[in-house]
Image (cartoon, coloured by chain):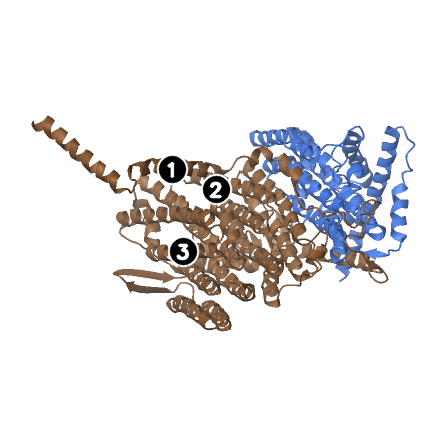
């Protein structure tokens, strides 16, 4: 069944591409069919635990789903379907639709392939397909191929080589490519290899999950890819790194005596990623870039949770994995819709869309509240669990760092919403209409999903619990969570359902209180027609506040912003370039130079000959 | 059904208490400020007069849907925090004690930290829709300042959590009753850090950069009048009361009856008020950096103290 699904994806990708040549409508329909039919088959037809063997090229490839990979595959399939529906109107009238559909389908296929792989060979093959398809997406629009594309490619290559090296070492020592064998026989390796292999794998997975200092590709690559793909890129593709990281942490690091030290280091890297990426997100003036940095930051939280590794932290991290896919998928769709309707994503250009694109605004608002971690939405559940886990695991300074990151996150949340939807309404954007229904419904669905999971997180905790039990944790249900309840190891409780009712009751009461006799008989005033403390603004006066939006805060964090990993990489790159420049003086590619070398070499030989034998 | 009705009535009683006390404090503060400035100052009940005047006004204009919802978001924060924070200590023996239980056992400190940011963010949306640039400037300043004072505040809380291995406010109050020591003496550094954070939280000078009357014309509230301003004013009063009660619960053992509650909260409230009367205003980046200076250092000391002892 799994083989068939993967084949359907692969065949569908090619057929879609060819069909798109015939007529765009055929291409659209084939694309939707290619994503939705195998995805539906996946949901209905693939039992967890079933194993398939495939004999090819003298190797046995083993495929099958585990509870852990089932959790991740739900993200891929769910987000894949919604983004596919969104992508059709998004790509309408754009260039290279065929290439987009092809790569999109291949990405979904390769991610499912990674999750289904039970041996390192197929894992690596699918990993490379994923990298390639996402690389082609990043350079799809043909802009900044040199800067963005190459950067992404180099880092992916570093990750791939690290993984390849780890695979080779494991196979040479243990004579097996099976994941299970390498994990179970990990103790038989030498101590050096026991430390080398996890670190190599963590580098490979750290690149994909944009862990600092391997993150520099991410902000550019996320913002350069088409927005209909970036949701999948940030929501699902980067989670493959987390999937690998969970495997490595649980199976390898746990068996090491130095495991706690490595865990602490990774957790600190994650915390630093979260804080620094948040600060960078605040300084961005483009919605795509802002969300891209925010994605890097959110991955930092997840890495912290995975690295801490207590049951509560793992619950928090895996919950955030799913939730992040939902709200960030929705937010990237929002940006895509705005790009589609206005042609720009720069905060400084577009503003005041709230009355023109109300449904997009509602999705953005709900997703942003979930992103900020404010109750009663789902982001809060993971934040609460993560903080409790950190405090109970004696990571006091790390928890302060994360609190800082999360509070600073409110700044970019507000900047995002204000940038697109609030503020002055300019006549320049008076023509803007709400995005097509097929674009609005997926983002609204994802946003509402975070709302539901904020009050009924047990819907998601059940599969997470199954996944954790599979990798060797005790059952957490009833001990760390119940029906709409959260517990911590200390016995602290948050009851989500009554809180939701109170929040809704108070909200509805005061909304009605304000609404009562509020709109009838009153006149709507435009954003020009405001009091501004008694001074009447003139027609020509510009009341738009967009440039240097967070200037006071940026001033406060100025010393920090001077430091960038990117600069060090650039310096390193420049150094290498100087070295290559020197090499080029020798290998000039000029026939005469090489002739001189030959003559000199002969002369040298003669010289020696004279000295030695003369 | 009956249970829900009784709970609702109790919640309303708590709300009315918070409203009256908060509004009175507001008036008293205006009086004290006036006397310190060598003015007569308005009477202590001036805030009630203002509030009911605003409530009775009819409105001629509106600014759009988000503007309506902004004020409602603000009220959600005030009321939900008031419901979660225990108003009176669980061991108190006054006959009205059980009225104020509300939802004390349904959330903890981390929940409170997050729900407290819900309203300002919603309010910021409403302020943004009016299109007044001063409102948005005020919001960005307020959020920046929040990032500032949140660090020492969370450090103080984490220090307490480390020592007593709980994050529940009710548990902290029980611990203080059992040991007989207020936490402000048990971990003095945590108390100092929390009080320094409080200066920013209550937004009196030198941290009144959000509403800064001379620069921003009251900032986020500037396009509001009538019922909107009434809602914001009462939300502010209730929220002030809730935050003061939280401080009293955490550091001063809570209060057994309403008289003690008023005395303790009033004494605590005088710290930011009196400091504010004699202070000029910081710039935003100065305020943020101020919080990341000494208050954060003292917060670190609090954590060290908690880890070592």
Figure quadrant of residue B217: top right
Per the image, the residue denoted by label 1 is: A576
Question: Of label 3 and label 2, which has the lower sequence position?
Answer: 3
Give the secondary structure at mark 1. helix
A128 above or below B264? below
Label 3 to label 1, Cα distance in Å?
25 Å
**The color chain A is rendered in:** brown
Image coordinates for residue B16, horizontal then vertical, percent: 83, 49
Residue B80: horizontal and vertical position, in percent? Answer: 72, 50
- Looking at the figure, which quarter contains the N terminus of chain B? bottom right
Say what secondary structure mark 3 lies in.
helix
- The mark total stands at 3
| Vertical relation: B268 (above or below) B81 | above
Subunit of mark 3?
Answer: A
Name the disc covering residue A132, or none. 3
Q: Tell me the quarter of the picture where residue A589 sits.
A: top left
Secondary element under disc 2, as helix, strand or loop, is: loop
Chain depicted in blue: B
| Left or right for B251, reference B49 | left
Q: Tell me, yes or no, if residue A531 can be seen here.
A: yes
Q: Nearer the viewer, mark 3 or mark 1?
A: 1
The outermost residue toward the left is A614
Q: CA distance from mark 2 to mark 1?
A: 22 Å
């Amino acid at each position: 069944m799994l083989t068939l699904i993967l084949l359907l994806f692969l065949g569908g990708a090619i057929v879609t591409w060819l069909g798109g040549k015939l007529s765009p409508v055929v291409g659209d329909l084939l694309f939707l069919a290619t994503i939705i039919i195998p995805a539906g088959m996946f949901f209905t037809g693939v039992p967890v635990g079933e194993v398939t063997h495939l004999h090819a090229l003298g190797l046995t490839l083993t495929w099958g789903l585990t509870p852990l990979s089932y959790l991740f595959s739900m993200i891929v399939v769910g987000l894949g379907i919604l983004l596919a529906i969104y992508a059709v109107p998004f790509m309408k009238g754009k260039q290279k639709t065929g290439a987009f559909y092809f790569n999109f389908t291949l990405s979904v296929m390769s991610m499912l392939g990674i999750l289904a792989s039970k041996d390192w060979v197929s894992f690596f093959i699918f990993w490379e397909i994923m990298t390639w398809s996402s690389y082609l997406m990043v350079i799809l629009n043909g802009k900044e191929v040199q800067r963005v594309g190459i950067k992404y490619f180099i880092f992916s290559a570093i990750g791939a080589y690290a993984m390849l090296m780890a695979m080779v070492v494991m196979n040479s020592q243990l004579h097996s490519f099976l994941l299970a064998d390498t994990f179970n026989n990990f103790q038989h390796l030498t101590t050096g290899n026991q430390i080398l292999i996890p670190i190599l794998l963590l580098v490979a997975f750290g690149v994909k999950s944009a862990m600092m200092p391997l993150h520099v590709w991410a902000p550019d690559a996320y913002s350069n890819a088409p927005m209909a793909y970036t949701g999948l890129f940030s929501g699902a593709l980067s989670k493959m790194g987390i999937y690998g990281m969970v495997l490595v942490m649980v199976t390898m690091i746990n068996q090491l005596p130095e495991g706690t030290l490595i865990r602490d280091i990774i957790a600190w890297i994650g915390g630093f990623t979260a804080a620094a990426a948040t600060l960078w997100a605040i300084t961005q003036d483009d919605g795509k870039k802002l969300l891209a940095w925010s994605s890097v930051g959110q991955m930092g939280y997840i890495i912290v949770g995975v690295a801490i590794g207590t049951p509560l932290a793992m619950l928090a991290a895996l919950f955030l994995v799913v939730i992040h896919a939902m709200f960030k998928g929705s937010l990237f769709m929002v940006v895509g819709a705005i790009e589609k309707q206005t042609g720009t994503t720069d905060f400084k250009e577009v503003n005041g869309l709230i009355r023109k694109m109300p449904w997009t605004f509602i999705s953005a608002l709900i997703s942003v509240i979930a992103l900020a971690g404010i109750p009663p939405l789902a982001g809060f559940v993971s934040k609460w669990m993560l903080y409790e886990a950190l405090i109970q695991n004696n990571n006091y300074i790390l928890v302060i760092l994360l609190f800082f990151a999360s509070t600073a996150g409110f700044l970019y949340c507000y900047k995002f919403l204000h940038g697109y939807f609030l503020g002055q309404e300019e006549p320049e954007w008076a023509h803007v209409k709400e995005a097509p229904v097929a674009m609005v419904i997926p983002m609204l669905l994802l946003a509402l999903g975070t709302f539901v999971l904020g009050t009924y997180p047990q819907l998601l905790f059940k599969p997470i619990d199954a996944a954790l039990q599979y990798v060797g944790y005790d059952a957490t249900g009833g001990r760390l969570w119940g029906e709409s309840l959260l517990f911590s190891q200390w016995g602290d409780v948050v009851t989500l359902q009554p809180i939701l009712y109170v929040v809704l009751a108070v909200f509805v009461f005061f909304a009605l209180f304000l609404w009562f006799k509020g709109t009838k008989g009153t006149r709507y005033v435009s954003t020009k027609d405001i009091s501004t403390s008694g001074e009447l603004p003139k027609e020509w006066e510009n009341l738009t506040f967009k440039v240097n939006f967070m200037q006071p805060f940026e001033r406060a964090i100025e010393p920090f912003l001077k430091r960038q990993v990117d600069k060090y990489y650039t310096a390193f790159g420049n150094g290498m370039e100087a070295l290559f420049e020197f090499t080029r003086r020798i290998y000039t590619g000029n026939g005469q130079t090489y002739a001189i070398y030959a003559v000199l070499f002969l002369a040298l030989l003669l010289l020696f000959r004279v000295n030695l034998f003369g | 059904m009956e249970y829900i009705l009784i709970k609702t009535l109790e919640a309303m009683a708590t709300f009315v208490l918070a409203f009256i006390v908060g509004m009175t404090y507001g008036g008293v503060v205006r009086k004290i400020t006036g006397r310190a400035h060598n003015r007569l100052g308005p009477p202590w009940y001036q805030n009630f007069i203002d509030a009911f005047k605003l409530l009775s006004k009819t409105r001629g204009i509106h600014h759009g849907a988000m503007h309506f919802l902004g004020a409602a978001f603000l009220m959600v924060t005030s009321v939900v925090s008031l419901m979660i924070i225990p108003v009176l200590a669980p061991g108190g023996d006054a006959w009205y004690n059980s009225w104020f239980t509300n939802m004390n056992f349904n959330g903890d400190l981390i929940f409170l930290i997050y729900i407290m940011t819900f309203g300002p963010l919603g309010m910021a949306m409403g302020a943004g829709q009016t299109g007044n640039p001063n409102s948005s400037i005020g919001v960005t300043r307020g959020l920046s300042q929040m990032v500032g004072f949140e660090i020492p505040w969370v450090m103080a809380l984490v220090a307490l959590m480390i020592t007593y291995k709980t994050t529940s406010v009710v548990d902290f109050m029980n611990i203080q009753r059992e040991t007989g020591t207020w936490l402000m003496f048990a971990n003095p550094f945590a108390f100092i850090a929390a009080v320094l954070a409080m200066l920013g939280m209550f937004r009196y000078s030198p941290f009144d950069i959000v509403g800064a009357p001379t620069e921003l014309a009251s900032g986020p509230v500037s396009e509001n009048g009538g019922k909107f301003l009434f809602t914001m004013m009462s939300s502010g009063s209730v929220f002030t009361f809730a935050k003061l009660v939280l401080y009293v619960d955490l550091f001063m053992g809570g209060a057994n009856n309403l008289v003690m509650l008023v005395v303790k909260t009033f004494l605590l409230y005088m710290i930011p008020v009196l400091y504010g009367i004699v202070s000029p205003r910081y710039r935003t980046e100065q305020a943020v950096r101020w919080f990341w200076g000494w208050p954060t250092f003292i917060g670190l000391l609090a954590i060290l103290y908690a880890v070592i002892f």
